[in-house]
Image (tube, rainbow, N blue to C red):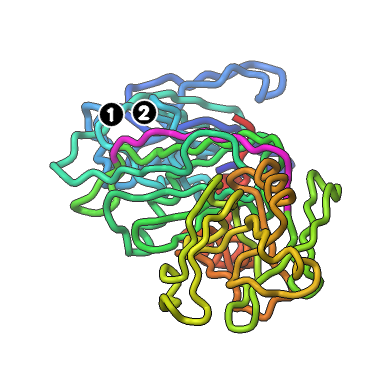
Amino acid sequence: MRQTESPRGGGAGRSRTAAGCALLVAALGAGLTGCVEGGHPLSAEPYDAAEQISFNGSVDGGGTADPDRPLEVVAEDSDGRITDVTAVDASGRRVAGELAADGSRWHSTSPLAANARYTVRVSTEDEDGRPGREVLTLTTGRPAPARRLAVAFGPRPGTYGVGQPLTAELSEPVGDRAQRAVVERALMVDSTPAVTGAWHWVDDRRLHYRPKDYWPAHATVRVRSALEGIRINDRLRGGASAPLTIGTGDRVIAVADAAAHRLTVHRNGEEVKRVPVTTGKPGFETRNGVKVVLGKERFVRMRSSTVGIAEGSAESYDLDVEFATRVTWSGEYVHAAPWSVGSQGRANVSHGCVGMSTENAEWFYDTVREGDLVEVVNSDGDAMETFGNGFGDWNLTWEEWRGGSALTGGAAPVPEEAARLRPTAA
């Protein structure tokens, strides 16, 4: 936390500078306060601030901190103040904290990891505005035995379309909102180019991450967990989890207009092809909304019995279908439908899929990849499900999406979270 310059009272007209540094602690040794004759006070080398600060019992005499308690730094000298504290463990994880407006106290607001070594840097100022420094190391104790929360990230490594959400599956359920915030804060996403994004809790074990808008084309996205050793509750701590890196390809978006019986494909903002199609007929209307390509099957057997249509009824079918691009788990595809070429571009006669000629279906199959986007508009069908039938994540507004985060909850994030949710290039 950093304070801006503020004038000292009493007409002195001096400015106080807030310097940045990191904090956590060990045993405090005695130090000397240095001063410089003449010149500006800020030109002096930082003095040893050990005698100006204490850790208020949060660190014992052996330099060990309890990972289940907040770390606290207190200014012992009434004529001085703390300007900044940072604490970083050996793996680079920073401890979030809050500095009192008057510089009298700093305390951690995110949990410490157990069995970890931290470097803590404390910056201070004396009454004349001269900077002080103290750099310490501390360790945290080994916790009592607890279950370990592992995180499995998805999808598998590879290159995807710009609509592909990240997924995180937890090995243990987490229902409490405060505990969810601990977990979510430790799931770190970095992208190049940078984007604004957020996690959304699907249920007690699953989270999805998406940007405010689609991913940039040809981006690199990395996700990792910083949960290892972090206390989530009395019986659960974070465990080790493997990181994941994926890339994105071109920005490919296909729009199927059910009323116009036409599918238009755009690549990187330019229209590349229009093809006549047929979509779901009355009673079997294609779902409206944005869907994400889940996979491609060169041949697939489609049977009406798998979607609840009784065998032998007037609507039953059993077909071998070519060039099938799946967009829902319930059986919606974009696929070759040579039997309906006469209706394509003119009428909707399918049982919910987007059908086109074999030639056009092969072109579409070869053009799109997993994670690309297919949007259906002007259908009389239901709206695409948000979760559970593929990736309907993009059908939520950004405000609705943030409402599923334990950190933002639909409100504007605090500055620290805004920075974390706007990842920088790794």
Cα–Cα gap, marks 2 and 1? 6 Å
**Circle 1 crowding by C-alpha within 10 Å: few under 14, some 14–19, many from 20:** many
- Residue 389 in sight from this viewpoint: no
* Number of numbered callouts drawn: 2
Residue 268 lies, in percent from the top left, at 80, 44
- Circle 1 sits in a helix, a strand or a loop, which is it? strand
Q: Residue sitting at 48 percent across and 43 percent down?
A: 155
Q: Give the vertical position of 405 relative to 2 (above or below).
A: below
Residue 118: give its label. 2
Residue 372 among magenta residues: no
> In the picture, which quadrant includes the C terminus?
top right
Q: Residue sitting at 71 percent across and 18 percent down?
A: 39
Which residue bears the numbered disc 1? 139
Of residue 125 and residue 245, the one placed in the foreground of this image is 245
Mark 2 vs 1: CB contact within 8 A: yes
Q: Residue sitting at 45 percent across and 27 percent down?
A: 49
Q: Residue furthest left?
A: 145
> In the picture, which quadrant includes the N terminus?
top right
Looking at the image, tell me whether mark 2 or mark 1 is earlier in sequence order: 2
Of residue 297 and residue 49, the one placed in the foreground of this image is 297
Of residue 356 and residue 331, the one placed in the foreground of this image is 356
As shown in the figure, which amino acid type bears the numbered disc 1? Thr
Q: Quadrant of residue 24?
A: top left
In this image, 117 relative to 366: left or right? Answer: left
Q: Which residues are magenta?
A: 239-253
Q: Quadrant of residue 221?
A: top right
As shown in the figure, which amino acid type bears the numbered disc 2? Tyr
Residue 36: give its label. none
